[in-house]
Amino acid sequence: MNLKNFKIDFKNKKRLIPQVLTISFIIFVIAYFSYNAQINMGNRGISFGYGFLSQEASFDITFSMIDYDGSYSYGRAFLVGLLNTLLVSIIGIILCTILGVTIGIGRLSQNYLIAKAAEWYVEIFRNIPLLLQIFFWYYGALRLLPLPENAINFNDISYLTIKGWYVPKFIWTNFSIFLLSVIVSIFAIFYVFNYAKKQREEIGKHVPAGLISLCIIIIIPLITFFVGGVTLNFQYPELNQLSDTVYNFKGGVSIIPELISLALALSMYTATFVAENVRAGIEGVGKGQKEAAASIGLTRGQILKLVVMPQALRIIIPPTTNQYLNLTKNSSLAAAIAYPDIVLVFAGTALMQTGRAIEIISITMGTYLFLSLTISVLMNAYNKKMAIKEK
Amino acid sequence: MIKFFKPSRNNLNRSLSIGFPLITLAFVDFFANTFLDTNLTAFLSDTLSYFFPLIIGTVGLYFIRIEFSGLRILDNFNKNVNSTSFNAILTLLIIFVLFKYVPSLLDWLFFDANFNGTSKEDCTSNGACWVFIKVWFKRFMYGMYPNPEQWRINTAFIILFALVGAAFFVPVKYKKFIILFMIFVYPIIGIKLISGGIFGLKWIETGAWGGLSLTLIVSAFALILCFPIGMFLALGRRSELPVIRYSSIGFIEIWRGVPLITVLFMSAVMFPMFLPDGTYMDKLMRVIIAITLFEAAYMAEVIRGGLQALSRGQYDAAKSLGMGYWRMHLFVILPQALKLVIPGIANTFLALVKDTPLIFVVGLLELAGMIGLAKTNPKWLGMAIEGYVFAGLVFWVICYAMSRYSQRLEKKLSTER
């Protein structure tokens, strides 16, 4: 802030008074609330503090990606919830992008039936509250799946039942070497793209960067299987008879129905918004651009790849990131069907047990706020980089 | 040989006489499979037999894809659904999927459904059990509101619809009075009518409110209240005074950065801690405040968009007439900016209506919540799909109508400018 301007601020009464009033109002509200909170907590005999995070949580969580049971701390429970939130968000983001782009392009199809079908998909799923869609999948559709003994069988590899979707478990040896090779290939791909760009800009030579990267990402990790001692085994789920009538699957990984219905509903709902963004982006590229590209002899594929998409992406990406953020925030609806995300685990069970409303709600909201702000900061940086530089 | 089969205008009749029989064959095979349970192509291998209609149909469509055939219907058909082989496959797939699943869906929804009866046992056929909706209909609409008093909710909504209708049809001169009445006077009348406690009306606590009427009450109140707050925040965010600007930005970004469900949790468990000991604030009121503040942040961003779209000249002109900040905004800037963002406001309201089911987390049961309650009733187990399909339909009709209306407004306003 400029010091000179700051001085003028204080000289000018017209500017000073409203600001002082605002500050005093904010301070008053905060002071009043914290005063009341202190008295209320004093009456209930609890003191403010985040020390409870290291206490033993002593409740179980149905679905966890890291080791967890009742003997771990509240902090660990928070981490489990956070990871579950991130898991369903990432699955949702991937699915909604695939679905959304397909439908967005479908809406622009020359084929009347496809365009209509895509339009009706958008109109139907956009206008039904997300919570109802989650309920529909969870309490309605997924409850119609068969019991384990009559499971829907996918080639004896994975099974879909009312209790969840059983998929093979990956058992790695020397997983770190494999991971390292993937990271190395990602760096190599970056290099290839940079090299291709340089060649194109300096010599005008076309390097098939996409094809080369595809080879790199397949070949380098594959080599580690032969020379790095990396092995991959699958543990397949097997039907197990618990008693005369009760069957269950053992082994493999179980994807719980809560996760399936949440991911389905989130991605199908958000896909409608992504589709609209994609459509607006492609329609937003001027017709003249396509005609100009065609007139210099580019093929249809080249026009799409080199002229339309780079411009359309500039329109598509900012609102779509916003949708990704919305999806992440909407994943908090998990609490409604008892998928153990951060809201259910932390703002639900942990709050019930400890009664520390202020601390727990502030941590939960703070986490979401942190996620949102990080993504918007990254987004703004990206927008600045992508903005058309006028020369 | 290839030239012989290549469809063109010159061999129009030959191509058509190969193409149409193939398409017909594809559909006959498909219908025989779907509706008559007979596989005409059983002599082929399973996979081939399964895809037979698709393959034959695609080949057939290839033969009738004749450019400038001179037949108008055929040209239109080719242009719209049969422009390339890929399109032809997609067209066939969509037609097949529609014919395969739509009839059974319609059967479930209407033809095999049960409409008559009073209990679950009356649902004997395979279709949906709409008896469930019929029996619980009043609960889905009014929640736990006592039956003899439900006319009060009806009256309140009839007055509202009459006012909205009147606002559309009266001359422009009186329009603003009706709108002002709707915003400032009607909410008080409506809430008194529904909650009672005066004029000999029985007092009905907010815990008993519920169903679709609660959805509409919450959204209407939140909309009316969030509008002025959003307007002040939008102006604050564009203010030249740093304190006001940064506190507005902070407020807006905090609310926009958290999910509504945590805000509702906050209103339920954290907010009472902030009030003086012993004060009790009604649950519904807390929820409406929470949703209002949440939506106000979104509303502020919508209105800010309108403010930004106005040209600098508008501000300069107003200032040159000697108008101060408030007069300038009230008479020159806001009327134009708000008109620009009417579609955005409608979209915010749409989002608000879709968000109301979330109030279940604090124990208020609107439509989706009442269905959740009804489906766990021991006499009505297994009715979840019917319930949620019904709720989805109700919400869909409301939201679709609103989104169409906002799209129409958008078109109308954009041509006016």
Image (cartoon, coloured by chain):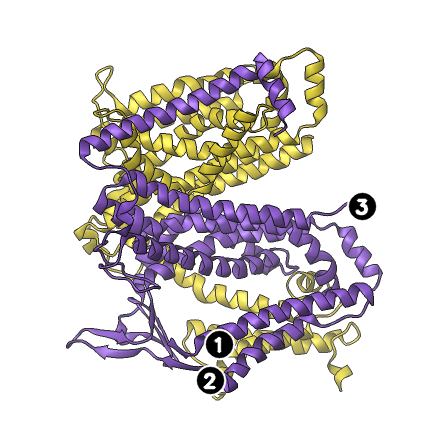
Mark 1 vs 3, N-terminal side: 1
The tag on residue A391 is: 3
Residue drawn at x 27%, y 33% as measured from the top left? B209
Q: From the viewer's perspective, is residue A212 above or below residue B193? A: below
The picture places residue B390, in percent across and down from the top left corner, at 35, 48
Observer-side mark, 2 or 3, equals 2
Disc 1/disc 2 C-alpha distance (Å) = 9 Å
Left or right: B44 in relation to B307: left
Label 1 is placed on what type of residue?
Ile
Label 1–label 2 contact, CB within 8 A: yes
Label 3 is placed on what type of residue?
Lys
Toward which corner of the image does residue B381 lie, by quadrant? bottom left
**Residue under disc 1 on the same chain as residue under disc 3:** yes
Mark 1 lies on residue: A177
Mark 2 lies on residue: A229
The residue closer to the viewer here, A70 or A279, is A70
The picture places residue A332, in percent across and down from the top left corner, at 38, 49
Disc 2/disc 3 C-alpha distance (Å) = 54 Å
Label 2 is placed on what type of residue?
Gly
- Label 3 sits on a secondary structure element that is loop
Toward which corner of the image does residue B195 lie, by quadrant? top left
Residue drawn at x 69%, y 60% as measured from the top left? B76
Residue drawn at x 36%, y 60% as measured from the top left? A259
Q: Colour of chain A?
A: purple
